[in-house]
Amino acid sequence: MAGGRVFAQGDSGGEVGARRHLFGYNAGISACERGKQWQRALALLSEMRESRLEPDVISYSAGIRACEVSELWAKALDLLESMLGARVDPAAAGSPDEGLYVHDVEAGGPKDVFKHIVLVALLQQMAAGADPFTFIDMHAASGVYNLSSEETLRCRILERGVLRLSHAAEGSGKGLVADYLAAVWRCNKALDSSSRALTLYPGSPALAWQWLRPQDTAVLFEAATEPYEALRRTFSLLDRGVGRRLSLLHDDSYMRLTFGPWPWPSGRQLVLLDPPYDSIQSHGTWNVFVLRRLLQRSPSSCVALWYPLVDQEKVASLHSRVQSLAAGSVLVAEMWLEGSWPRGEALQGSGILVVNPPPAVHAQLLAALPELQGALGATGSRVLWL
């Protein structure tokens, strides 16, 4: 740097020079991230704009992380908003999030079972009210998963999840766990009536569909083409009245929420954020940003965010960031499968953070999680208000 700037005026111009300048700035901002120099990182981003050099996804991402490591959550959210306002594609970074969850592999596994039992509790309470509600799934995927697929058979995760739970709970006949299992079997009968075994596992859209009443609506987003087409096929079989209470949107839900002309539904909403955690779009800052946007649009919405349990520090950071939004009551439910909380650094499990939950959900989960923990052989669980 000369005179406090990464590049002085008069450096070589043209496309090659611009790329060289961009690389230099990105390297500088990344160095600021590693050194926890968030002020300098933001100054470099500002300097880029003054020099008419547009920051790219690497520039913004390094700046966001520089704010994150200094626990400046609001500045990180504002910088993400600036990136979106500049129409920078966040997916272009191609930065994996440790491969913590893959839908086709995890289908019917312990993480899925836990997540969907919490979802069933929310759906039951939403459907108990007289007024209509809208279920919005921000990452609907294919809706239903084939338990005999190559991925599922190779990993056999379902044997530690829905199959183990089904065997342990056989004959219990009541309660949240029983209601969830009955919904899994209903979906199998609706889509594969000839089989007496579990051949299909319903994702969150297919589970939610079973609690929607004639006055309720589902809005399902899926950005990837192949899962979206599978989702369309699933719902053409689940309900012949497709289109009456259902909107299937082949779109990136986060970008539509941020920029798209999407008329927000009136009345009550239950919104599920269930990202795959395999790209920069599912980093903590992005999810908290979307949560903030959702609650700005409808402060009374019930919004559920699923997240993997990786380590205590990351979980505590997420909780703290959501609390900083001052968005209303926040309920947390978590279950871990390996390691001993809070010591384990390689925890395997998942949590759901629910903003504005129906009050009765707390008692439902307190009653159901011990049964679920025992049936799945989990090493711990908890339900708490933040």
Image: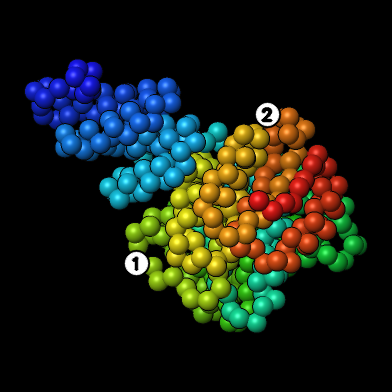
* Mark 2 lies on residue: 345
Task: State the quadrant of the N terminus.
Answer: top left
Q: Are marks 1 and 2 in contact (CB under 8 Å)?
A: no
Q: Residue at x 28, y 30 (%)?
A: 44
The quarter holding residue 339 reads top right
Q: How is the image coloured?
A: rainbow
SS at mark 2? loop
In the picture, the disc for residue 35 is: none
- Where residue 284 appears, x then y in whole percent? 51, 43
First along the sequence among labels 1 and 2: 1
- Where residue 226 appears, x then y in whole percent? 47, 54
Label 1 Cα crowd, 10 Å radius (few <14 / some 14-19 / many 20+): few
Q: Residue at x 21, y 38 (%)?
A: 49
Decide which of 154, 291 is in the foreground and name it.
291
Q: Residue at x 83, y 58 (%)?
A: 367
In the picture, the disc for residue 261 is: 1
Q: CA distance from mark 1 to mark 2?
A: 43 Å
Q: Residue at x 32, y 23 (%)?
A: 27
SS at mark 1? loop
- Where residue 221 appears, x then y in whole percent? 48, 61
Residue at the limit of the structure toward the top, as seen here: 2
